[in-house]
Amino acid sequence: MSALPLLEVEGIYSGYGETQVLRDLSLSVGEGEIVSLVGRNGAGKTTTLRTIMGILTPTSGRVTYRDEDISTLEATETAKKGLAFVPEERQIFPELTVRENLELAAHGGAPDVDSLSVGEALEMFENLQARATNAGSSLSGGEQQMLAIARALVGGADLILLDEPTEGLAPYIVQDVMDIINELNDRGITVLLVEQNVHVCLELADRNYVINQGEVVYEGTSEELRADEEILDKYLGVTA
Amino acid sequence: MIGSLSQALFDGLTIGVVYVLLAAGLSVIFGVMHVINFAHGELFALGAYFALALVVPFGGTAFFVALFVAPLLVGIVGVAIERYTVRPLYGRNPLYHILLTFGLVLVINDLIYLVWGPGSVSLPRPAVLTGTIDILGINASVYNTFIIVFGGAMALAVWATLEYTKYGLIIRAGSQDRQMVRNLGIDIDRYYSLVFGMGAALAAFAGIILGGYQTVSPEMGMSVIIPAFVIVVLGGLGSFKGAVVGGLAVGIIQTLLRHYAPIFEGLVIFLLMIAVLLFRPRGLFGVETEEEGGDLLTGTDGGLLDNRTRKRLGLAMVALLALVPLGAGTLYSTYAVTLMIEIIIWGLFALSLDFVMGYTGLVSLGHALFYGLGAYAVAITLLHVSQSAFVAIALAILISAAIAWFVGFLSIRVGGVYFAMITLAFAELFYNMLYRLDITGGSEGLFGISTYYGLAGIGIDLGDIGLFVGPVALTGQSLFYYIALGALVASFLLTRRMLNSPFGSVLKSIRENEQRATFIGYETTIYKRRAFVISGALAGLAGGLFTLNSGYATPSFAYWLHSGEVIVMVILGGMGTLYGPIIGAGVFFGLEEILTGFTGRWRLVLGTIFVLFVIFLPRGLVSLPAQLAPYVTGGSGPGPEPAADESGVKGDD
């Protein structure tokens, strides 16, 4: 690991009600890194992000962010510390306009973290600029994804938790999203990315965690993972 | 003609503006917090009374001061209500908020009676708002114009706040996706008190301006709350725009009907409400919101007694009940029998509701519909068809079951809060019909009914015979007591038998997790409808028995307050147990009986107890022993068997 650890997850157990999804899961993300979590459907990827964000509370284990224990904090508080969650369903507010979606984010987020103004965000995402007064529900999947990311930037984020950002998008838009993620990283934002699409991970991430049934079964850089045919075949169903 | 039409439109608009202000708060509160606030009408009334208290000592001009001070005070009451009663229930099934706010209706309404007394008073208006002016050829009253202009401006201000301020943006976002607002680092929960307080203040404002237009009376809250729900449903739960359009529409429709087709007044809006719920449950402008989780809490968990002890206890209770008429007139007055009959009949009614609410999770807010149907079926049969009690009761059961099938067929496809609303609409539709039809005797109802027990003209009148048990002669009421008790016991055994059959297992699986029940191949709608029909039939039996005994039926039987009261009994006793609701009925009437000895305002005490139950003991009285057991030395319950035998309890109903 090249940089200082920004986020440290140590042996967390978490899930929904009586259903335990994560079992003794540990990972760490260094400042400025792009780290991916890959794994099959139901492996616990989204649950990991939701637990880090504070939407779920781990039943045991610890989540530390900048050396501070955030295990029991709720999403409202973790967001104030500079974490931003971009959910799989994007969760754009359908009845608010694009601009209002961004303005809302500006009222929240982390006060101590550098953030974009609404105007800057609209400049950065040109296709959103054109639709600033349209309702969130009228956006295409790709536009919604861009808006969800822009929202995180307006709130101010040091660590973005991205859940399946390319899911359901046309291939040429997938490339746009990947470019955006790289651009975020260039701005110094750390990214924890959940993906089912291994190729996206291999291309973007510095390091990858493969998770299966709620446990980390592999950790390695993209070069290492690309070379490890056994892992690719066994857990990801990919023949490289 | 044109003049009278525009006059009617003008009046309709006046009422419409009041409705808009009332419904806006109700709708936004639902949108953001998913709370159906039945107490909203009482906050409306409270506004009018606070204004009254300010205006009467200082005269008409104080009206303008009251217009701002009273809503502020009611807003503070609203904040307190949210903080201390509504807040503990977030995360539970939204139906608990319905129950809670229903309890608050009883409390606030009785407080109003207590402080200001019954009867209606007029709220003095300032001199400048009296008289008439000429607007576009209509001779309009200044006060109406004031309502439209000032109320309209108020609604506009609310709209602008929602649309253009930070708070408005957060509130609008919160009504679309609360969790995402939290994810953005915004503490939406902090805004709940604010939203509730603002809604309350708006309701109070509406109450004041209507109070100046009509009169101020303790019933004013109850009479507007149902139309307010109609408006919110029409416009779309959670939508401000919907509240505006719905409020104006309902105000104008109602006024026009009153002028031109009074027979349909009170019917059309409920038909509209039913139609909207069936074809477009989210209303005209509503958004689809996620149905929020939380289970209904039944009284079954953690029972202390095993099956055998429970059966013995039940038999002992029935035996004890059977002895009641024997002591009447000697050990205690004959009134005890009358009271016990009422408890038994309401126990049966509560049992019927529990069968559908406690076992399938369908909360019917209009169960008084079936009680009323049973009562009127008996009354009409006895007056026009046959004087045989058997025929009358059989018809009561059949008709209630048939209507329950029809209502269930239409309603069960919509779930949760929408089901509660649609059953409420059906009950209110029936209630309004009772007033308007000749065969139901209008507002007087039907009375002077006589009957005999037999068939085809051969039978007996309970008053004519006497059964001698030792020195005691049982006749009239005392004999009817056994009929009622028999009906209750038979209904209990029948429903329990059903619940222990495969049919019952499916019902319970629906309550636990309907989706999974569907996945294993059960068409849950059919099972729920069957349960609803049985429930309706038993409620009809209860209503029928009441009329059979009392000899009358009045529209109040089908009033929404009755539907609320029977839910109170079910929760008080313990939902999902069958016997709990019967105990609940006993406690309800027992409390009423004791409390009326001290105060006429027994609903205040009962409502408070109920509110505390919903917050602290939602599983009802029957869960009390199990909850107290750990604190009592020895840890065992009241029964002779030790509590250790948990496994025997699990499989019980």
Image (cartoon, rainbow, N blue to C red):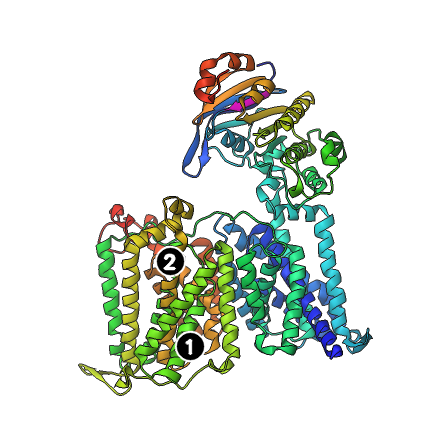
Give the residue type at disc 1: Tyr
Marks 1 & 2 on one chain: yes
Compared with B288, B130 (above or below) is below
Q: Secondary structure at mark 1?
A: helix
Q: In the rendered picture of this protein, how many numbered marks are placed on residues?
A: 2
| Quadrant containing the N terminus of chain B in the rendered view | bottom right
Q: Which quadrant of the view contains residue B330?
A: bottom left
Give the image location of residue B579, x and y in percent: 32, 61
Q: Please identify the dominant SS of the magenta region.
A: strand
Name the residue located 76 percent from the left edge and 66 percent from the top edge.
B149
Give the residue type at disc 2: Gly
On the question of residue B358 being in view, the answer is: yes
- Which region of the structure is painted magenta? A34-38
Mark 1 vs mark 2: in front = 1
Give the image location of residue B293, x and y in percent: 48, 47
Structural crowding at the residue carrying mark 2, measured as other residues with C-alpha within 10 Å and reported as few (<14), some (14–19) or many (≥20): many
Name the residue located 51 percent from the left edge and 50 percent from the top edge.
B88
Question: Can you identify the residue that label 1 sits on?
Answer: B376
Output the chain of dot 1. Answer: B
Structural crowding at the residue carrying mark 1, measured as other residues with C-alpha within 10 Å and reported as few (<14), some (14–19) or many (≥20): many
Question: Can you identify the residue that label 2 sits on?
Answer: B574
Outermost residue, bottom side: B464
Name the residue located 73 percent from the left edge and 78 percent from the top edge.
B4
On whether residue B518 falls in the magenta region, the answer is no
- Lower position in the chain sequence, tag 1 or tag 2: 1
Residue sitting nearer the eye, A126 or B143: A126
